[in-house]
Amino acid sequence: MKMFLAGEWVDRAQTIDVRDPFDDSLVDTVPAATPEDVETALAAAAAATVTARRLNTFERSQILLKAAAWVNERLEEFATTIAREGSKTIREARKEARRCVNTLTISGEEAKRLVGETILFDSFPGGEARKGYFERMPIGVVLAITPFNDPLNLVAHKLGPAIAAGNAVILKPATVTPLSALKLTEAFLAAGLPRDVLQCLTGYGAVLGDRLVSDPRVRMVSFTGGVEAGLRITARAGLKKIGMELGSNSPVIVWKDADLDWAAESCVSGAFWAAGQNCIGVQRIYVQRSVYAPFRDRFVEITRKYRIGNKLDEACDMGPMITEGEAKRTARWIAEAVELGATVACGGRRTGALLEPTVLENVPREATIHHEEVFGPTVNLYPVATLDEAIAEANSVNFGLHAACFTRDVDTAHRLAAGLECGGVMINDSTDYRLDSMPFGGIKNSGLGREGIRFSLQEMTEPKVVCWYLREPEQE
Ligand code: NAP
């Protein structure tokens, strides 16, 4: 595919292969954008802020709803692209494509709710005879940088609100999964978005990133990805807004009164969705000691039934990791944990980029797989005695995106919801639950700011106050 730069689909002499991680087959190629392309994109985006701002609310909303309909009419095509270029199975990819339709639809609806407020200027002495309001203004150029693991819907989470807010956007998708983002760009053009408002620049973050991020014409960097790139971007961004949706190491607490079958089923799915490459994937499960053995047995039994392999096979439950290198890295972390005393309850073997869904027990606190984000198909089980211990253990890592608990007891659920340090607590669901309209984001190393269209709209706009001084007419 070509990339979309300054209103044109363009090629470049240097291209990047997009390969299917299952069999390394070539899916397509995309241009490798150059530093000169970055300059072109920035100049075009700065000029396009005028076009973007001038789209009225009805037009923005219509474009977003038409883009949603366009994707909806091609769900299978989008799902196949997601499944081919990335790690997801075709069933997982269909769910992401449907969610993208929701995200764009919500954006089209929220465009009509982006309102300000009247201001009571006369509420303090000195403000008498003044009336006014604030409205929310587009921020200008939004730079959207997205990761590989949800190559369509996480792009929609940036383009939807940015366009609803009246901004111009430069999108830089993950190099390994640029095709879904390019197809979404096509959807926006087909929906009538003026051609200069959105650009999709394919190429390496390491080559393009610093130039894009540090340029003062960019007024907001909306980033989703890993902590390392997030910190680098934060250090280089200068005086502009930043939104950081970063990684996590999500804990689940399973209490003795829980529905253990449901807890196991839900946590297996939460741990191994997208081969564990999921920012809200389940990584650590703390189980009350009295139910530890039955929970572990049920969890392992379901995990052993997982069919892994070809993502396009309808029966496949889990595909490969995004690259063989990532599968090797995860296998190394498992080996390190085992060396330190962990035991493998099931899984652990690797063939190329395919790593079996893996369940670990007795994982020591110093193991990397305990305290860092694994972003792979492995999960750790730990017995705990008290709720306080469970909460302290859950909070003991430097991430805080989602946490979850399984219990039938209302008091236990309330105590956990209050005690868990994170952006969202799921009760009787795994951490892997997200509604596209809810506030989504984390604390600690999990990020800064919130997405979920209504909340992104606040981040991607600035309030502008208008104040009227109503002088008494002079006496005739
Ligand atoms: P990544 O390596 O950080 O890359 C994310 C994006 O940043 C890619 O487009 C990448 O481009 C770009 N990038 C890399 N270095 C850059 C730089 N110096 N300047 C500007 N851009 C740069 O992350 P990933 O491996 O794709 O995704 C996995 C991570 O994303 C995990 O940590 C996961 O938890 C996190 N994530 C968070 C959320 C959330 O909502 N909180 C959702 C999904 C994923 P290249 O591809 O060219 O390197």
Image (spheres, grey):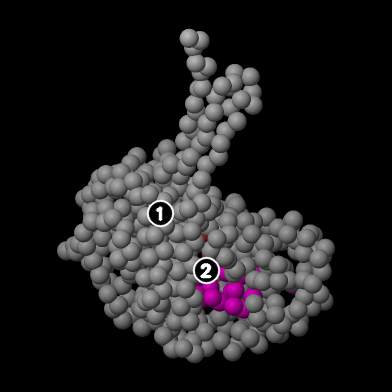
Place of residue 251 in the rendered image (x, y in percent of width and height, measured from the top left)? 66, 65
214 drawn magenta: no
Query: Where in the image, quadrant-wise, is ligand 1 located?
Result: bottom left
- Left or right? Give the position of 338 relative to 241: right
Between 166 and 402, which is closer to the camera in this rendering? 166
Q: Residue at x 67, y 65 (%)?
A: 426
Between 451 and 348, which is closer to the camera in this rendering? 451
The residue where tag 2 is placed is: 278
The label number, if any, that marks residue 58 in the structure image = 1
Q: What is the secondary structure assignment of the residue under circle 1?
A: helix
Place of residue 239 in the rendered image (x, y in percent of width and height, measured from the top left)? 42, 37
Between 391 and 171, which is closer to the camera in this rendering? 171
Compared to residue 132, the image places residue 318 above or below, namely below
Q: Is mark 2 within 8 Å of ligand 1?
A: yes
Of mark 2 and mark 1, the one earlier in the sequence is: 1
The label number, if any, that marks residue 169 in the structure image = none
- Left or right? Give the position of 182 relative to 280: left
Q: Amino acid at mark 2?
A: Asn
Q: What is the secondary structure assignment of the residue under circle 2?
A: loop
Q: Residue at x 51, y 45 (%)?
A: 115
Circle 2 residues within 10 Å: few <14, some 14–19, many ≥20:
many
Q: Amino acid at mark 1?
A: Phe
Compared to residue 270, the image places residue 166 above or below, namely above
Q: Which residues fall within the magenta stretch? A: 267-288
Q: Residue 31, can we see it?
A: no
Between 61 and 217, which is closer to the camera in this rendering? 61
Circle 1 residues within 10 Å: few <14, some 14–19, many ≥20:
few
Q: Quadrant of the N terminus?
A: bottom left
275 drawn magenta: yes
Place of residue 430 in the rendered image (x, y in percent of width and height, measured from the top left)? 64, 71
